[in-house]
């Protein structure tokens, strides 16, 4: 039930509110430019698509309230009683860990409508501690939670450093323990003061973030994609990584995204901003389009999965050289007769992986029959056949026969251990398939088919990923060992709601590669947010049914009462010196 309570509280925060312009949000002053990620939850927009009253009418809502603590019942009935300003947005910020650049600390920011109501709400959650006032800052914390707020804003660090937690021993206080608690309290106050102090270099110094705030959406996302160079340990792996050009991967790489819950689908539109080096390459080699001719070569059949992309060989070579990957590949393949870069030069830069369920197939095609009609293809168009032939010869080379101590051949285990993929190479196409019949049919197929029809709306882009979720889920249900018909029916209701997931993009505009992801639902008329919430309802109902079923055989365990002596007492101490801010502000638009 605790999980359900948390889901309800989270849903309340995400949906209860009204409209406010995100670009004018005063919380932006507290968001640092070096944040690893910033998630902006647009409460007003979410509330416009599903009212809190609609949530209260869900079948599991009242059932959940029966078992919830009294203060949670009050909050769920009247979210405004929390004192939170639901007419504004929430922010989840991943702050860099000063001790470890590869780690981050999540922090929740929000605005307050009534600080006194908020204090009363938090006091009910952390009932065994007292609110401490340090200047304009108020703090309430225990071993599990930290809440800090001023008259206008609140902040909740969503993780705590366990190494700094010093619970009181059952035997009582000790001098050493008291000093540790005082030190921890001082650190906690400084941390909260820093979080609720406007930063010297806010994220709004970056014009790209400002552009993001102007986008209409239910959620906005800003992510730093700069990679940290791994620390060397003197092994062979580190020698290999030294060949990579970490410079272009450590600066100027950001991603922004806008999520919208539309009717019938949830859509995420993304912009991947490049540094100066990558930007120059994208401008020098414009994005290409999907190869429509290649897509028209697939046999008729239900498309289960499709991955198709196109990139000019010149662009690929330039990217490999700039990143240092060319040296890495040459080092790894220096003893091989196949040179990957030469093979790439023999192709036109397009590649398509497709899985279909064939409507019909040759009765001699035992492989497709064994796979229940599934056919798998990996295909590319050819520019220079001679440069691809070394790869084909390598793949067609017979495997070395392994024998045991007595000289008997050791055959691979598994139903498809003896499967030998078919490889066909012509002047125009290179095709790999698990079935030689399917590969031959690929070469002989011309004209529109199910794959080309599916891809047609996206052929102006450079990449496409499409997955039939219903087919995948149905296959997983068939493979499941569970025999509970009731649970299977409930799960089927959830899975049938999904249709397909689609990811497409590749266009380059204003220093960013554009891409879009869509989670498509079977019901095209209803808003996708409502469909998500209904899925949560179904999951919750399943959990409650399972709990009632278990309770008929097993007595509920007695409730455990926490020992208050285990809680960390925060004593009132003098206000520490305010945190120092660096005055150096930089605009990161590389």
Image (cartoon, helix red, strand yellow):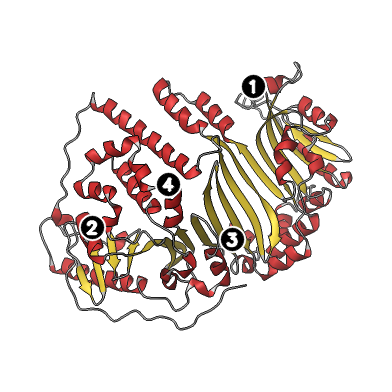
For label 2, the SS is helix
Residue annotated with mark 4: 50
Q: How many numbered circles are shown?
A: 4
Residue 124 position in % (x across, y down): 20, 55
In 3D space, how far apart are the residues under numbered discs 3 and 4 (Cα atoms)?
A: 52 Å
Query: Which one is in front, 47 or 465?
Result: 47
Give whichever of discs 1 and 2 has the lower sequence position. Answer: 2
Going by the image, does 513 lie left or right of 572? right
Give whichever of discs 1 and 3 has the lower sequence position. Answer: 3
- Residue 351 higher or lower than 511, as above or below: above
The quarter of the picture where residue 434 lies is: top right
Q: Is residue 116 visible?
A: yes
Q: Furthest residue to the bottom?
A: 583
Marks 4/2 in contact by CB < 8 Å: the verdict is: no
Q: Which mark is residue 413?
A: none
Marks 1/2 in contact by CB < 8 Å: the verdict is: no
């Amino acid at each position: 039930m605790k999980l359900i309570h948390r889901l309800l509280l989270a849903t309340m925060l995400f949906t209860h509110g009204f409209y406010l312009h995100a670009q004018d949000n005063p919380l932006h002053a507290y968001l640092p430019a070096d944040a690893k990620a910033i998630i902006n939850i647009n409460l007003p927009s979410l509330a416009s698509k599903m009212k809190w009253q609609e949530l209260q009418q869900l079948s599991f809502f009242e059932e959940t309230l029966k078992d919830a603590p009294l203060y949670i019942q009050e909050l769920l009935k009247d979210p405004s009683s929390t004192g939170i300003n639901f007419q504004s947005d929430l922010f989840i910020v991943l702050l860099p860990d000063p001790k470890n650049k590869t780690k981050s600390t999540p922090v929740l920011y929000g605005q307050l409508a009534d600080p006194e109501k908020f204090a009363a709400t938090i006091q009910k959650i952390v009932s065994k501690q007292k609110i401490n006032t340090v200047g304009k800052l108020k703090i309430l914390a225990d071993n599990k939670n930290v809440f800090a707020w001023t008259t206008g804003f609140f902040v909740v660090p969503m993780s705590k450093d366990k190494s700094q937690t010093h619970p009181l021993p059952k035997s009582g206080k000790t001098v050493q323990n008291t000093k540790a608690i005082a030190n921890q309290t001082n650190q906690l106050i400084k941390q909260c003061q820093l979080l609720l102090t406007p930063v010297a270099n806010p994220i709004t110094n970056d014009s790209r973030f400002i552009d993001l705030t102007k986008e209409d959406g239910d959620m906005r996302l800003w992510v730093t994609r700069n990679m940290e160079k791994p620390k060397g340990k003197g092994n062979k792996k580190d020698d290999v990584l030294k060949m990579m050009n970490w410079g272009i991967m450590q600066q100027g790489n950001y991603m922004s995204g806008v999520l919208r819950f539309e009717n019938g689908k949830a859509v995420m539109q993304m912009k991947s901003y490049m540094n100066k080096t990558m930007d120059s390459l994208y401008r020098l080699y414009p994005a290409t389009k999907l190869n429509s001719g290649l897509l028209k070569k697939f046999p008729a059949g239900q498309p289960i999965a499709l991955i198709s992309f196109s990139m000019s060989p010149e662009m690929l070579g330039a990217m490999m050289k700039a990143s240092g990957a060319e040296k890495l590949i040459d080092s790894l393949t220096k003893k091989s007769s196949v040179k990957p870069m030469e093979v790439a030069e023999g192709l036109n830069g397009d590649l398509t992986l497709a899985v279909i369920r064939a409507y019909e197939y040759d009765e001699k095609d035992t492989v497709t029959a064994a796979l229940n009609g599934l056919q798998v293809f990996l295909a590319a168009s050819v520019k220079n056949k001679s440069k691809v032939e070394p790869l084909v010869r390598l793949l067609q080379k017979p495997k070395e026969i392994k024998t045991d101590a007595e000289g008997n051949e050791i055959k691979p285990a598994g139903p498809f251990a003896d499967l030998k993929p078919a490889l066909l190479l012509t002047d125009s196409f290179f095709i790999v398939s698990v079935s030689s019949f399917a590969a031959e049919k690929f070469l002989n197929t011309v004209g529109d088919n199910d794959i080309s029809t599916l891809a047609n709306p996206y052929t102006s882009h450079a990449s496409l990923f499409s997955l039939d979720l219903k087919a995948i889920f149905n296959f997983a249900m068939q493979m499941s060992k569970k025999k509970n018909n009731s649970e299977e029916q409930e799960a089927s209701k959830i899975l049938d709601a999904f249709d397909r997931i689609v990811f497409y993009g590749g266009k380059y505009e204003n220093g960013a590669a554009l891409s879009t992801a869509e989670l498509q639902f079977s019901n095209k008329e209803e808003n996708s947010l409502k469909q998500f919430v209904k899925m949560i309802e179904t999951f919750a109902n399943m959990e409650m049914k399972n709990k009632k079923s278990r309770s008929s055989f097993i007595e509920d365990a007695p409730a455990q009462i926490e020992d208050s002596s285990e809680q960390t007492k925060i004593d009132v101490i003098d206000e520490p010196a305010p945190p120092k801010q660096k005055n150096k502000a930089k605009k990161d638009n590389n």
